[in-house]
Image: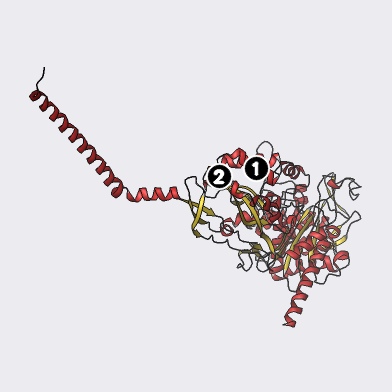
């Protein structure tokens, strides 16, 4: 049996070990406290603040787009929107069921919302619905205190007052896609998808603000501590004249086609109309698949911006190209005359004039005024395809105009040599060159190219870059050197088209308040044999009728505007497209009269 003296040393050793252990533990705790309180102080304080505070972004109001007179083309309407922060919602399924009771969403709308929630960050607001009126939102607002994570805010939504009239130019918005989010946009922001909404996205978008909120342990907002307001986007002022565009659309009478009007000195675009259009307001939150499919499958192709994307055979509006080429190359025919019996015999073929009985003796002036095909067949044959191509390139065809819109077509010009099926090349056959000289065959042009061509004739040879911003300085791409007398010969011929008996647009435009210099054109759509004696008969189907062109400038003595009009399957340019030009001239004349009256009053 151990005595008391043997036990005591062992007990003292245990006590010492215990004390040492306690000391080491206290030292570790003290070290950890010093580390957390001093070395990690800033980081932990920030983390604590983050747990206590929540930063919610505030969307900026988008800038407006206005025409030259301040009429809103893309504006913001006050409305209400419902959003959800998913991480603050305990039971999303139950919350959505409650929302359906108030908002009466259809199953399709619900699926779209659920898909949006699934793709979004849990700590960011997800847009559930917008463009709501107070009457729609009032029942829900009264019960918001029962719906954790749901918020109703007053805001704005994009609205396009002129709908289809400006759809191709202005474009539309849609909710941010994954690729937009990767670029820094929020999931519930709207982003420009087409037209000027896309081109000017950075200027229109504005800068986000934010709101610091204090939240409780359940992540519910207790108080708003600080708010940094967003900066509104920049307003864009266009050169467009919306009243002129309305006059053009009314004169088109629902027909398919395009109208371009531009200032002959500055390159400002006054009208850029493509018909038919679409109501882009449907894109703001989401488009029904049936409606999108109907647009895609519509044979009139309402999604196509015909002013810049559609390339057409130019028909007789092209005839000024061989006219200028003939004068430049001192062609004998350009300064002489020929006989038009109604056709040109080419080997065993007849290339016919539109006037079956012929025009008789014609020179350059007569050929433009009466649009004689035979004269230009022979002129083209004298010049050859390379000279025609070179002249067309000089006047801006075969290239994009550079207008600030996406997907502009460059049209098509025949290459200097013809490409054969076996890969070999050869000079163009005479017949192909001759029909190219009257605007058929191996060429296509866009309406905006034709309008710029008319502007260059009016301003003395300056090839301008068309633009859409009001007050922007004119940009001359190049100047065409052409003798003044030669230019005047073509101008006078174009004047007589609309102002002298026998001119192809005289009947429709003889009473225009501004004297017009122009050129009609009829572009063949369906190939018809040149030997067909009944070529002048109107095809039985509208889709087989020729396209109708009219281009020109006004007023003749002191040009202000140039225009190009095409009516698809419209038939004759003077009767189908001419009245559109007349309607626009009347509108501009009325605007000038109103302006003068207002100035006199003041």
Residue 13 visible: yes
Would you place residue 499 above or below residue 213 in this image?
below
Would you place residue 57 above or below residue 348 in this image?
below
Depth check, mark 2 against mark 1: the one in front is 1
Q: Name the N-terminal-most of marks 2 and 1.
A: 1
Task: Report the disc number at residue 179.
Answer: 2
Secondary structure found at label 1: helix
Camera-side residue of 149 and 230: 149
Q: Position of residue 131 (x, y in %)?
A: 67, 53
Secondary structure found at label 2: helix
Q: Where is residue 156, by image quadrant?
A: bottom right
Q: Residues within 10 Å of mark 2 (few under 14, many from 20)?
A: few
Q: Where is residue 15, by image quadrant?
A: top left
Q: Residues within 10 Å of mark 1 (few under 14, many from 20)?
A: some
Figure quadrant of the N terminus:
top left
Q: CA distance from mark 2 to mark 1?
A: 32 Å
Q: Where is residue 342, by image quadrant?
A: bottom right
Asked if the residue under mark 1 is in contact with the one under mark 2, i.e. CB atoms within 8 Å, the reply is: no
Would you place residue 517 above or below residue 97 in this image?
below
Camera-side residue of 230 and 17: 17
Q: Is residue 184 left or right of residue 320?
A: left
Residue farthest toward the top in the current orientation of the protein: 1
Camera-side residue of 441 and 153: 153
Pointer 1: what residue? Answer: 98
Q: How many marks?
A: 2
């Amino acid at each position: 049996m151990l005595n008391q003296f043997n036990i005591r040393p062992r007990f003292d050793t245990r006590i010492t070990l215990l004390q040492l252990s306690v000391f080491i533990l206290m030292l570790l705790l003290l070290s950890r406290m010093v580390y957390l309180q001093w070395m990690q102080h800033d980081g932990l304080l920030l983390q604590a603040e983050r747990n206590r505070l929540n930063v919610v972004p505030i969307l900026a109001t988008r800038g407006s787009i206005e025409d030259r007179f301040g009429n809103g083309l893309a504006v913001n309407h006050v409305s209400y929107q419902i959003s959800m922060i998913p991480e603050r919602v305990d039971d999303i399924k139950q919350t959505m069921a409650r929302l359906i009771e108030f908002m009466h969403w259809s199953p399709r709308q619900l699926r779209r919302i659920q898909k949006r929630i699934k793709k979004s960050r849990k700590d960011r607001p997800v847009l559930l619905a917008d463009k709501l009126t107070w009457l729609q939102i009032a029942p829900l607002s009264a019960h918001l205190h029962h719906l954790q994570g749901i918020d109703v805010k007053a805001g704005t939504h994009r609205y396009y007052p002129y709908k289809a009239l400006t759809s191709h130019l202005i474009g539309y918005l849609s909710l941010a896609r994954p690729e937009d989010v990767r670029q820094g946009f929020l999931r519930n922001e709207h982003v420009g998808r087409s037209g000027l909404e896309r081109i000017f996205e950075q200027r229109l978008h504005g800068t986000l603000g934010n709101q610091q909120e204090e939240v409780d342990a359940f992540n519910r907002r207790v108080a708003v501590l600080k708010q940094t307001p967003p900066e509104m986007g920049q307003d864009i002022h266009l050169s467009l004249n919306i009243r002129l565009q309305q006059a053009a659309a009314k004169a088109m009478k629902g027909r398919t086609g395009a109208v371009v009007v531009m200032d002959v000195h500055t390159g400002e675009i006054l009208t850029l109309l493509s018909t038919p259009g679409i109501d882009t307001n449907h894109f703001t939150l989401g488009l029904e698949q049936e409606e999108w499919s109907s647009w895609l499958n519509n044979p009139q192709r309402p999604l196509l911006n015909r002013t810049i994307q559609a390339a057409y055979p130019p028909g007789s509006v092209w005839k000024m190209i061989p006219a200028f080429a003939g004068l430049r190359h001192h062609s004998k025919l350009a300064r002489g005359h020929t006989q038009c019996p109604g056709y040109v015999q080419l080997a065993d073929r007849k290339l016919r004039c539109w006037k079956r009985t012929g025009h008789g003796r014609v020179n350059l002036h007569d050929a433009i005024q009466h649009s004689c095909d035979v004269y230009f067949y022979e002129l083209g044959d004298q010049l050859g395809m390379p000279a025609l191509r070179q002249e067309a390139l000089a006047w801006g065809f075969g290239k994009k105009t550079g207008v600030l819109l996406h997907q502009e077509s460059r049209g098509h010009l025949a290459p200097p040599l013809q490409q054969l099926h076996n890969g070999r090349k050869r000079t163009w056959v005479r017949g192909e060159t001759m029909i190219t000289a009257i605007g058929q065959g191996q060429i296509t042009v866009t309406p905006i190219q034709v309008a710029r061509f008319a502007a260059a004739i009016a301003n003395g040879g300056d090839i301008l870059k068309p633009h859409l911003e009001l007050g922007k300085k004119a940009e001359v791409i190049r100047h065409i050197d052409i003798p003044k007398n030669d230019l005047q010969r073509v101008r006078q011929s174009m004047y007589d088209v609309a102002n002298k008996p026998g001119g192809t647009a005289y009947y429709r435009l003889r009473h225009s308040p501004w004297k017009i210099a122009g050129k009609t054109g009829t572009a063949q759509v369906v190939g018809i044999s040149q030997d067909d004696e009944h070529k002048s008969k109107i095809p039985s189907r509208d889709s087989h009728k020729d396209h109708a062109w009219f281009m020109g400038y006004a007023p003749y003595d002191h040009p202000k505007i140039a225009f190009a009009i095409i009516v698809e399957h419209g038939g004759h340019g003077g009767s189908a497209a001419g009245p559109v030009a007349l309607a626009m001239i009347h509108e501009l004349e009325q605007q000038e009269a109103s302006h003068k009256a207002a100035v006199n009053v003041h």
